[in-house]
Image (cartoon, rainbow, N blue to C red):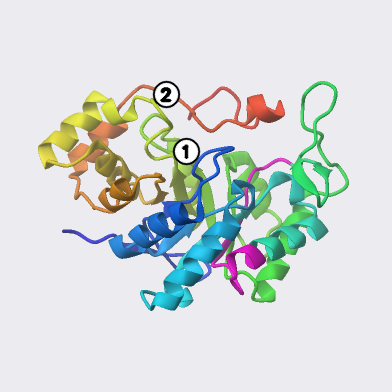
Amino acid sequence: MASWPAYTLSSGAKMPAIGLGTWFGDNVIHPQSFYDDILTAAIDAGYRHFDGAFLYGNEKEIGKSMQKIFASGKVKREDIFWTSKCPSSLQKPERLRYALEKTLERLQFTYLDMYLLHWPVQNTPTDFPANCNAKKGADGKSIIDTSFTIKDTWAEMEKLVAEGKVKAIGVSNWTLPLLKDLLSHAKIPPAVNQYESHPYLPQPSLLAFCHAHNILPTAYSPLGQGASGLLTDPAVVAVATAHGCTPAQVLISWGVARGCSVIPRTSSVTRVKDNFVMVELTKDEVETIAKVTTRARYGDPFEKWGHDLFGREFE
């Protein structure tokens, strides 16, 4: 069985190509045993890269599970590449520091390998720090905090690197124009841009820009979401049939073949293991899947916040 590569980031750190996404659904409460089982299964399968976020609301439970795993001797903290994300409502410098400290406290870690700005919007918290969700106005839109700029936020992110609290910094859901703006003032350029990427949302221009500027693209929702059709798409199924593997394995391998790190998520211990199996796709198979013409975006916060971050374009 082929093994997954690791990418060398602009920071010099190594990020494993495949990570486990740890968002397991909005408003879903899982018992501690769920996290124990899913994370232990991931470690046993070979995952060493994990992706979390303040907003996922499960970092405390995950931290308990990871401490059990470390105590078992299966792996050490330094064997793991851990990413977390600062929510849009906590991007003001002093709030950002609060968000990071809470994440470290809940995970019981002394540092993060990667820290990302979760969304490119400066929301106002409802009641900081009691309620860090985005505050909404009478029009239903989230209220933008204009008292600071992304330049201020990024300068604070750079301080966290200097202090050793995070090893590398990056962004999530940043568009090409936003990346260009960030690079115009960043002293430490973003090492990663995590965004939705799959055959229905390939975004070749954004992918090419990231590669050209030594920003590693990290693909979330590589399998789509729910009944998206990706797992039953004829082009994907044909390749899976040819290899005697699952469509999910094809989609994950396709993302890596494009030069992305990929963070599939699942609540199934069985699928956690299955998703870690690499399929060596041919160049023709990669190109065939790339020619799929269906277009869809599954992670758009427009309805939640009322702000159109991506426009209606898919490329």
Mark 2 Cα-neighbour bin, 10 Å: few <14, some 14–19, many ≥20: few
Q: Which residue is mark 1?
A: 205
Residue positioned 16% across, 58% down in the render = 1
Residue positioned 64% across, 43% down in the render = 119
SS type, badge 1:
helix
Up the image or down, 12 lies above or below 189; here it is below
Q: Is residue 199 magenta?
A: no
Question: In this orientation, does residue 13 appear?
Answer: no
Quadrant housing residue 131: top right
Q: Which residue reaches farthest right?
A: 147
Up the image or down, 92 lies above or below 66; here it is above
The spot of residue 10 in percent (x, y) is 51, 65
The spot of residue 84 in percent (x, y) is 58, 57
Mark 1 Cα-neighbour bin, 10 Å: few <14, some 14–19, many ≥20: few
Give the foreground label among 1 and 2: 2
Q: Is residue 116 magenta?
A: yes
The spot of residue 241 in percent (x, y) is 13, 34
Q: Amino acid at mark 1?
A: Ser
The magenta segment: 104-121
Q: Amino acid at mark 2?
A: Arg
Q: Which residue is mark 2?
A: 295
